[in-house]
């Protein structure tokens, strides 16, 4: 081929996701993978059975309807009403997608013009940068800084320009665990209304909040008509491989996002859609037990990381803990993570990959705790032993 690079300019620099790299390292070394956030126990058996039953009974084995099966759209609308008092019409205001990932991609591709600016919290979930880039738009980071990782709302206001088209929110926030407070959400909503901005909000960890509560910004005054809310079954029901996500928004916004979505996957996950419809209707006890279980795991990993010598930033939500490795005399999270499997038998992810400005998160490392308690304990043992020398320097 000629001198022209194969990868186009929009995607230049995106490379392989850090999760692929670190998960491959975990497989190659046999280390405990606290890098990528997927549970090591599956969700409820009756929900797995519902998927198997749908396949056996021939429900969803052929292309399901473009917006998603009616049963699931109804269950999503019921869920928004049950937990947040938000009313959505299942026929016109709900769209089923191939995970939250496709919803984010379709929203960016449909709503952005080349040259538009998107303000998003940094550290970013890794698909945000790629999707904004594929849409030809420009990302403008609002950096959340240790130790609190709260958004600086005056700074946010100053980042809005005439080119700003939308705010891309993520609460609870991966990787920092920040959960936006009602006051923060109100300030963001007022800014969106004043400057006539769209808001796309990624709420896949809505049921994993340990302190405070999850508040959807769509419920605030003036927001329903300008907000695309995104969530997914993967995290809430521990079936991350099923890739069933959804959008709730006004009919105009839903049909706009659907225009892009129909040419990405068209449809996906037919039989799983039936199972997720059942999952969303699980009793409150399911959601409470899920949270309690993850809270116990958070506390175990949090205490373990502290005793191993990390500086630990306790997350209010999600299933990740961000730490700082400066107490070990280390500065570079990437090098630290590459050495960690050999040193401790554990895989983690350097937060620097989630920043535009790698210096901002250089010494931060993220661990997930959506693993069995015995696995977390074994990881903590490995970290404590492997880092002992550094700790005592
Ligand atoms: C896991 C995750 C997603 C992806 O959700 P899928 O439903 O698996 O596509 C999106 N956003 C955030 C912040 C995540 O952590």
Image (tube, rainbow, N blue to C red):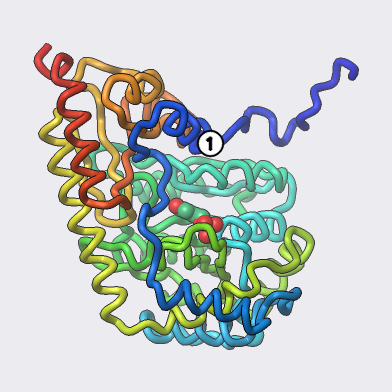
Front in this rendered view, residue 57 or 228: 57
> Is residue 72 shown above or below 34?
below
The residue at the point 71 percent across, 77 percent down is: 64
Residue identifier under label 1 = 20
Q: Is residue 195 visible?
A: no
Q: Which of 104 and 338 lies nearest the eye of the viewer? A: 338
Residue 9 point in image, percent of width and height: 75, 31
Q: Residue furthest right?
A: 2
Residue sitting at 35 percent across and 31 percent down?
Answer: 31
- The relative height of residue 146 versus residue 91 in the rendered view (above or below) is above
**Residue 393, how many percent across, how many down?**
12, 11
Is residue 357 visible in the rendered image? The answer is: yes
Q: Is residue 254 left or right of residue 5?
A: left
Residue 369 x, y percent position in the rendering: 29, 48
User: On screen, 354 above or below 334?
Assistant: below
The answer to whether mark 1 is within 8 Å of ligand 1 is: no
> Which residue appears farthest toward the front when viewing the image?
56
């Amino acid at each position: 081929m000629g001198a022209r690079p194969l990868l186009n300019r929009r995607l230049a620099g995106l490379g392989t996701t850090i999760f692929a790299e670190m998960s491959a390292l975990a497989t190659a070394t046999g280390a405990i993978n606290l890098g990528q956030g997927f549970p090591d126990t599956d969700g409820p058996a009756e929900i797995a059975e519902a998927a198997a039953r749908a396949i056996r009974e021939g429900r969803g084995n052929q292309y399901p309807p473009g917006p998603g099966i009616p049963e699931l759209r109804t269950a999503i609308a019921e869920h928004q009403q049950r937990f947040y008092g938000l009313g959505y019409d299942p026929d016109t205001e709900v769209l089923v997608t191939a995970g939250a990932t496709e919803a984010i991609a379709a929203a960016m591709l449909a709503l952005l013009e080349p040259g538009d600016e998107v303000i998003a919290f940094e550290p970013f979930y890794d698909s945000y940068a790629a999707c904004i880039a594929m849409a030809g738009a420009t990302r403008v980071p609002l950096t959340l800084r240790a130790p609190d990782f709260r958004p600086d709302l005056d700074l946010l206001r100053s980042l809005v320009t005439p080119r700003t088209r939308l705010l891309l929110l993520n609460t609870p926030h991966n990787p920092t665990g920040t959960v936006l407070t009602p006051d923060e959400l109100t300030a963001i909503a007022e800014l969106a209304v004043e400057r006539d901005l769209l808001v796309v909000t990624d709420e896949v960890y809505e049921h994993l909040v340990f302190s405070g509560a999850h508040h959807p910004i769509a419920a605030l005054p003036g927001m329903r008509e300008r907000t695309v809310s995104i969530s997914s079954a993967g995290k809430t029901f521990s079936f991350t491989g099923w890739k069933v996500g959804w959008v709730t928004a006004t009919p105009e916004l839903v049909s706009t996002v659907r225009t892009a979505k129909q040419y990405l996957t068209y449809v996906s996950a037919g039989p799983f859609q039936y199972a997720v419809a059942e999952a969303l209707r699980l009793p409150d006890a399911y959601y409470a037990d899920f949270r309690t279980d993850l809270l116990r795991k958070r506390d175990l990993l949090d205490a373990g990381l502290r005793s191993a010598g990390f500086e630990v930033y306790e997350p209010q939500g999600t299933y990740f803990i961000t730490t700082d490795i400066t107490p070990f005399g280390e500065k570079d999270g990437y090098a630290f993570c590459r050495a960690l499997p050999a040193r401790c038998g554990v895989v983690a992810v350097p937060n620097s990959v989630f920043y535009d400005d790698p210096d901002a998160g250089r010494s931060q490392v993220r661990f997930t705790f959506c693993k069995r308690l015995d696995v977390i304990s074994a990881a903590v043992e490995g970290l404590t032993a492997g880092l002992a020398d550094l700790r005592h320097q």
